[in-house]
Amino acid sequence: MIRRYLFGKKQIARVLITAVAALVFLCLNMSVYGAPDNGNGDDTDTTGLEEERDRNQEKLDEVEASLEELAGEKEDVEAQIEEVTEALVEVMADIDELTEQIVAKEAEIAEAQVEYDAAVEEENAQYEAMKVRIKYMYETGDSDYVMLLTQAGSMADFLTKADYIEDLYEYDRNMLATYQETVQKVAELQEKLEQEKSNLLSLQSDALAEQEYMEQIQSELEATAAEYASEILAKEGEAAEYEAIIATQNAEIKRRQEEAARRAAEEARRRAEEAARLAAQKAAEEAAKKAAEDAARRQESVDQVADVADTGVVQTTNKVSYDVSSIYSAGGSELGKSIAAYACKFIGNPYVPGGTSLTEGADCSGFVYSVYKDFGYSVPRTSFALRSAGTEVSYENAQPGDVVCYPGHVGIYIGNGMIVHASTQKTGIKVSNANYRGFITIRRIV
């Protein structure tokens, strides 16, 4: 429910922020970009406007980098919430089991009480019967006892009566001792059951305290995740504002450029032949120079990873060995595999917002941009623009060297469901599962 609420709020915020940004830009258009030309000035100059647009683009890149970091932190918190929730379920299950044991123990105690009451009743009955016989035999006086014995007809009869009196006394005493022993055993059983119940109640109390503590931790983590979601929403709104401003600036730049082109058309026609010759000459020289530089750079990159296919191990720039044998065992072009293996050389290097250095630090799009640049390919600098680079392929057909695009993030596919990417300022450049979050598109550059 919380996620659906935040998603709805996010969509509304995006629409409102985009609309407000467009209105603000239109209102400031006169002061920022100058009034339309009235015949006394040049309204085709785009230098200042392009500089302002580039500054806004830099700010947008910073916001996108911040969004990537916030998303990573939010994922860490959500993982902690999941762990706490699983542990909480186990504790609650233990509490249910202890409650059942306590109920069963109370039933045993009640049953023992019934047995105890019955034993006491039997003891009392036996005691009362014995008192009656003792009263009859002894409390009436010694004469009756002696008379019972002297009335014997013979010595055998005398001994028989004496034995009968002795046996009757022994029977009463034994029966009373038996009942007293039964009462004692039942009482001890009751005491044992009460102690066991007390132990179960203590365990239940501890489990309830643990449940309360874990619920508090869960609540705090959910509050932290909500704060990250709120920050992400604000950053996305800020990014939308910059995107709207940049789009409007690009439109104004285009308009001015078209106006400049129209004014320069006549002059261009006069100088077309000379300009074409000079341009062709310069283009040929630059193309030759660039071709030589690209060939040298590609050869250098190929040389750096030439041994990796045989050894299966690449030495990263921070002196850590990384096994890339799975890259060369995957399908795809050899160039794509070389690009993927080359990207893995920089695992462990830092993440720097707005950076493009593979050794000193780069953000996600700067990392992809610089890896491909070292192979002589020019790709867009931002994660948003990379979504349209090259050609789209499905996840099932992904090959090493392809670019995996996520919301506000990109990485290079290295095969077997894995990517290498500049993740966050906390983790730097690392290898992750390609499905660690939902991707938007996969682009093939080579």
Image: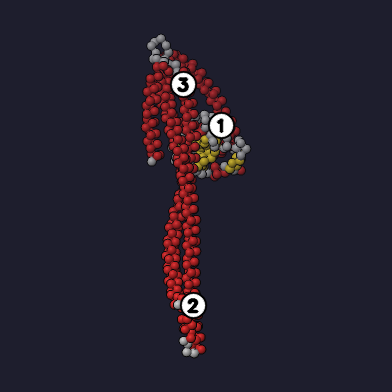
Circle 2 residues within 10 Å: few <14, some 14–19, many ≥20: some
In the image, residue 344 above or below residue 248: below
Q: Which residue is mark 1?
A: 361
* Quadrant where the N terminus is found in the figure: top left
Q: Residue at x 41, y 16 (%)?
A: 31
Give the colour scheme shown. Answer: secondary structure
Question: Which residue occupies 48% across, 61% down?
Answer: 193
- Percent position (x, y) of residue 370? 54, 31
Task: Give how far apart the Cα atoms at labels 1 and 3 are.
Answer: 26 Å
Instruction: Pick whichever of labels 1 and 3 is earlier in the sequence.
Output: 3
Q: Which mark is residue 52?
A: 3
The residue lying toward the viewer, choosing from 106 and 51, is: 106
Q: Which quadrant of the view contains residue 225?
A: top left
Inter-mark Cα distance, 2 to 1: 103 Å
SS under mark 3: helix
Q: Nearer the viewer, mark 3 or mark 2?
A: 2
In this view, the residue farthest toward the bottom is: 154
Element at label 1: strand
Please name the amino acid that badge 2 sits on: Tyr
Residue 401 in view: no
- Which residue is depicted at the point 54% across and 29% down? 355
The kind of residue tagged 1 is Gly
Image height check: is 143 above or below 387?
below
Can you see residue 149?
yes
